[in-house]
Image (cartoon, helix red, strand yellow):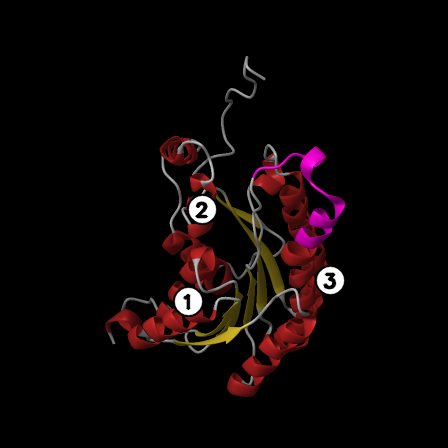
């Protein structure tokens, strides 16, 4: 097999769970892990998109996938996700927590306390829950966890205090878990994307008064002058899972250099 000769089957027969896997960064992760030979169980709320992706990647191989519809805010559905994975494959080698949402721009004055609690539940509590449910199986395989956070957890973002808070908590939780789970041989790392062109980015840009300007601003925020791709997101996670075997508790920026160099931070019209 050509891909095996080229060393591309870096995660052959390893079993991976991916949340929020039907589109965006999650889709990129599912595709790259299946290309690397992994058996991927992925979930999302959207049944149609999930089944479509399952069919596509299974037709390509060399790994395989199984889609399960799941609302990550429901503990019983997360338990079913883990149970079905073990029932089908008998093991778990990698958990990738990715499901979450970035609300439209809104300052703290316009963000209700209930909105904040709901976002915590969606973006953070589901990560904690799935880590807890998966760790008994990951300890057996000396597997690893990848928690998808965001660059803004480190640099902040205007009109997004609730979102940034959830992502900052994910990054901190990752470091704490890395400390606790090292004795079991389980690695826990964070991937922090900056601007990656996803359906959500497209949706949010369309909600602004000038889509083209919003997209261009997003592209020009990086030193590399473009946004990241879904493929690059998947490859970054694959690196953490398959190759970065002497890393735990790290935060890998997928940012194109967005956090570097001085830039204008204030405007005369503010």
The one nearer the camera, 267 or 6, is 267
The x, y position of residue 246, in whole percent, is 55, 58
Eyeballing the image, is 54 above or below 120? below
In this view, the mark in front (1 or 3)? 1
Q: Which residues are magenta?
A: 105-119
Residue picked out by circle 1: 49
Task: In the rendered structure, find residue 180 and report the number of the disc placed on it.
Answer: 3
Please report whichever mark, 1 or 3, sits nearer to the chain's N-terminal start: 1
Please report whichever mark, 1 or 2, sits nearer to the chain's N-terminal start: 1
Eyeballing the image, is 34 above or below 158? below
The x, y position of residue 257, in whole percent, is 45, 36
Judged left or right of residue 133, residue 193 is left
Mark 2 element type: helix
The one nearer the camera, 176 or 48, is 48
Residue picked out by circle 2: 203
The x, y position of residue 49, in whole percent, is 41, 67
Q: Quadrant location of the C terminus?
A: top right
Q: In terms of image quadrants, where is residue 133?
A: bottom right
In this view, the mark in front (2 or 3)? 2
- Report if the CB atoms under discs 2 and 3 are less than 8 Å apart: no
Q: Quadrant location of the N terminus?
A: bottom left
């Amino acid at each position: 097999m050509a891909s095996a000769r080229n060393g591309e089957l870096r995660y052959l027969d390893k079993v991976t769970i991916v949340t929020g896997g039907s589109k965006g960064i999650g889709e990129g992760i599912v595709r790259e892990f299946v290309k690397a030979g992994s058996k991927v169980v992925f979930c999302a709320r959207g049944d149609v998109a999930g089944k479509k992706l399952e069919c596509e990647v299974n037709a390509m191989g060399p790994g395989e996938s199984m889609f399960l519809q799941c609302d990550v805010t429901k503990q019983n559905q997360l338990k079913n996700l883990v149970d079905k994975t073990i029932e089908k494959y008998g093991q778990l080698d990698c958990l990738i927590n990715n499901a979450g949402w970035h609300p439209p721009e809104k300052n703290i004055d316009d963000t209700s306390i209930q909105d904040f609690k709901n976002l915590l539940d969606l973006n953070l509590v589901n990560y904690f829950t799935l880590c807890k449910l998966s760790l008994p199986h990951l300890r057996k395989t000396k597997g690893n966890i990848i928690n998808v956070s965001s660059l803004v957890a480190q640099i902040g973002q205007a009109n997004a205090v609730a979102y940034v808070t959830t992502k900052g908590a994910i990054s901190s939780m990752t470091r704490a878990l890395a400390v606790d789970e090292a004795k079991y041989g389980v690695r826990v790392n964070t991937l922090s994307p900056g601007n990656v062109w996803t359906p959500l980015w497209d949706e949010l840009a369309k909600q602004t008064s000038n889509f083209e300007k919003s997209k261009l601003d997003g592209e020009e925020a990086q030193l590399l002058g473009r946004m990241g791709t879904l493929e690059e997101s998947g490859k970054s996670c694959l690196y953490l899972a398959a190759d970065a075997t002497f890393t735990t508790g790290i935060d890998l920026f997928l940012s194109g250099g967005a956090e570097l160099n001085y830039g204008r931070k204030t405007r005369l019209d503010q």
